[in-house]
Image (tube, rainbow, N blue to C red):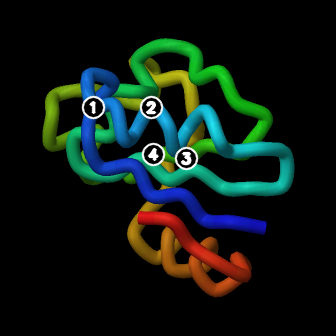
Amino acid sequence: MYLIVVKNGPNNSAERVKISASKEGDSVVLIQDGIFWALNDIETEAKCFAIKDDVEARGYTADDVTVPLISYDGFIDIIEKCDKSIG
């Protein structure tokens, strides 16, 4: 099970590759400008999350995004559960 950290928006080709390579059992966490992926449906079987503080810092709310919001403590919990990470 991989943790995939996405910190850049949908225009970034490296982030597109990471998301397209994710699969069921993986966790994708959207941080910084990566939260812009959550404004539309994300095509992956992985579980996706966005950092609440980053969403709010960019003027959005939970109603604006398509994935659950987590705190940085929640992010740490995911890090601890995943075997490997891709950042």
Report if the CB atoms under discs 3 and 4 are less than 8 Å apart: yes
Front position in the image: 12 or 59: 12
Residue 83, given in percent of the width and then of the height, sits at: 72, 82
The answer to which of marks 2 and 3 sits earlier in the sequence is 2
Front position in the image: 67 or 47: 47
Residue 38, given in percent of the width and then of the height, sits at: 45, 27
Residue 12, given in percent of the width and then of the height, sits at: 27, 31
To which quarter of the image does residue 5 belong? Answer: bottom left
Category of crowding for the residue at label 3, using alpha-carbon neighbours closer than 10 angstroms: few (below 14), some (14–19), many (at least 20):
many
The residue indicated by pointer 2 is 16
Q: CA distance from mark 1 to mark 4?
A: 17 Å
The residue indicated by pointer 1 is 12
The residue under label 2 is which amino acid type?
Arg
Q: Is residue 60 above or below residue 30?
A: above
Quarter of the image for the N terminus: give it: bottom right
In the rendered structure, the answer to whether residue 59 lies left or right of residue 23 reads left
The answer to which of marks 4 and 2 sits earlier in the sequence is 2
The residue under label 4 is which amino acid type?
Ala
Tag shown at residue 50: 4
Category of crowding for the residue at label 2, using alpha-carbon neighbours closer than 10 angstroms: few (below 14), some (14–19), many (at least 20):
some
Tag shown at residue 49: 3
The answer to which of marks 3 and 1 sits earlier in the sequence is 1
Give the SS element for disc 1. loop
Q: Identify the residue at image location x=22%, y=40%.
A: 33
In the rendered structure, the answer to whether residue 32 lies left or right of residue 75 reads left
Front position in the image: 59 or 39: 39
Give the SS element for disc 2. helix
